[in-house]
Amino acid sequence: MTKVRAISVGILVLSTIALISDSAVAKRVSIQGNSKTSVKSKCDGAFWPTSAGGTYGCVNQDGSGIVCGGVSKTDKKTCDTFREAPRCLPTRAQAVKAEKAQKP
């Protein structure tokens, strides 16, 4: 019984860590299809049209967003997207509840 509980909690912890680390990863995409007009029309939060570094982008209300442009040749042709990381790790009570739900 104790081994099963330890394994369940371990799986929950590892799953949470994997979820958080995946959420923090930015993805680089082509600037094609991500013009200022396109980014602005999809933005439901704060949009900036141009910065001193030559970037434009959006941070949506949920914390996700996109940043396009820059000063290097690569930056001028790409955008970096990101999504919101989870707000917090599960509490001990939530972990226990999840564990109890998995018992047959």
Image (cartoon, grey):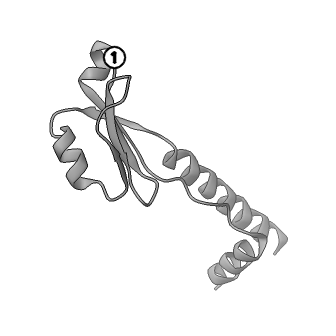
Give residue 59's position: percent from left, percent from top: 40, 49
* Residue tagged 1: 71
Label 1: few (<14), some (14–19) or many (≥20) C-alpha neighbours in 10 Å: few
**Residue 79, above or below 38:** above
User: Residue 75: in sight, yes or no?
Assistant: yes
The one nearer the camera, 35 or 88, is 35
Q: Residue at x 29, y 18 (%)?
A: 74
- The quadrant where residue 33 appears: top left
- The quadrant where residue 6 appears: bottom right
Give residue 80's position: percent from left, percent from top: 36, 35
Give residue 35's position: percent from left, percent from top: 18, 38
For the view shown, which residue lies furthest in the bottom direction? 104
Q: Residue at x 33, y 29 (%)?
A: 55
**Residue 56, above or below 92:** above
Q: Amino acid at mark 1?
A: Val
Disc 1 is placed on an element classified as loop
Q: Residue at x 38, y 47 (%)?
A: 65
